[in-house]
Image (spheres, grey):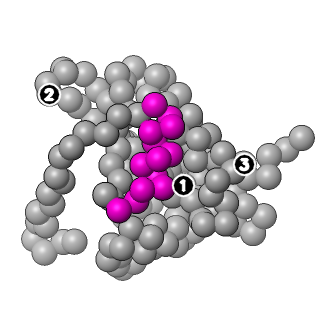
Amino acid sequence: MPRSHPIRTARRSDIVSLVDLCAAHAAYERAPYHRDGKEDLLGELLFGDPARLFAFVVEGPEGLVGYATYTVQWSTWNAATYLFMDCLYLDADVRGRGIGSELVGRIIAEARKRGCQAVEWQTPVFNSRAMTFYDRLGATGAEKVRYRLAIDGRS
């Protein structure tokens, strides 16, 4: 039986929908989001040579309903690579159906395939639903404060 919400690797034709999902994700996390130029920038990151960002998308009956993105990073302390899950987002009407767990499973499989020792990510402190989900996966939280310094006025 086919899945009602298939998960697949993002395609170049998904860029407009990905930008829409990014805007929805930012709103959910109470963060500003500026769409200007994002289609071209994400296209280059995801499909340039070499690609520097990777994405899985979740299909719904009328378009994309979720996504997860990741990059491979270095841990200086561990002298090893880890996979950083930059985003994991599902539209509200498809949450609680096991799709998030499947997306994380895909991310873990990618980490293993790439020889990474761990998967890391972050979530806003007010996103208790996400933290409960991550705790159920067996992940452990790390108390840190994330800082950001814009370069040349870029947000």
* Residue 120: x %, y % from top left: 34, 38
Mark nearer the N terminus (3 vs 1)? 3
* Residue 122: x %, y % from top left: 33, 49
Q: Secondary structure at mark 2?
A: loop
**How far apart, in angstroms, are the residues tagged by discs 1 and 2?**
28 Å
Residue corresponding to mark 1: 67
Examine the structure image and report whether residue 130 is included in the region drawn in magenta.
yes
Q: Nearer the viewer, residue 84 or 137?
A: 137
**Rendered residue at 31%/39% (across/down):** 141
Q: Amino acid type of disc 3?
A: Pro
* Residue 102: x %, y % from top left: 62, 40
Examine the structure image and report whether residue 128 is included in the region drawn in magenta.
yes
**Residue 111: assigned label:** none
10 Å crowding of disc 2: few (<14), some (14-19), many (20+) = few
Q: Is residue 78 above or below residue 154?
A: above
Query: Quarter-wise, where is residue 135 in the image?
Result: top left
Residue corresponding to mark 3: 6
10 Å crowding of disc 3: few (<14), some (14-19), many (20+) = some
**Rendered residue at 73%/52% (across/down):** 5
10 Å crowding of disc 1: few (<14), some (14-19), many (20+) = many
**Rendered residue at 42%/75% (across/down):** 27
Residue corresponding to mark 2: 76
Q: Amino acid type of disc 1?
A: Tyr
**Rendered residue at 35%/54% (across/down):** 123
Over which residues does the magenta segment extend?
126-138
> Does residue 131 show up?
yes
Magenta span: helix, strand or loop, mainly? Answer: helix
**Residue lying farthest to the right in this orientation:** 1
Q: Amino acid type of disc 2?
A: Thr
**How far apart, in angstroms, are the residues tagged by discs 2 and 3?**
36 Å
Query: Quarter-wise, where is residue 71 in the image?
Result: top left
- Quadrant containing the N terminus is top right
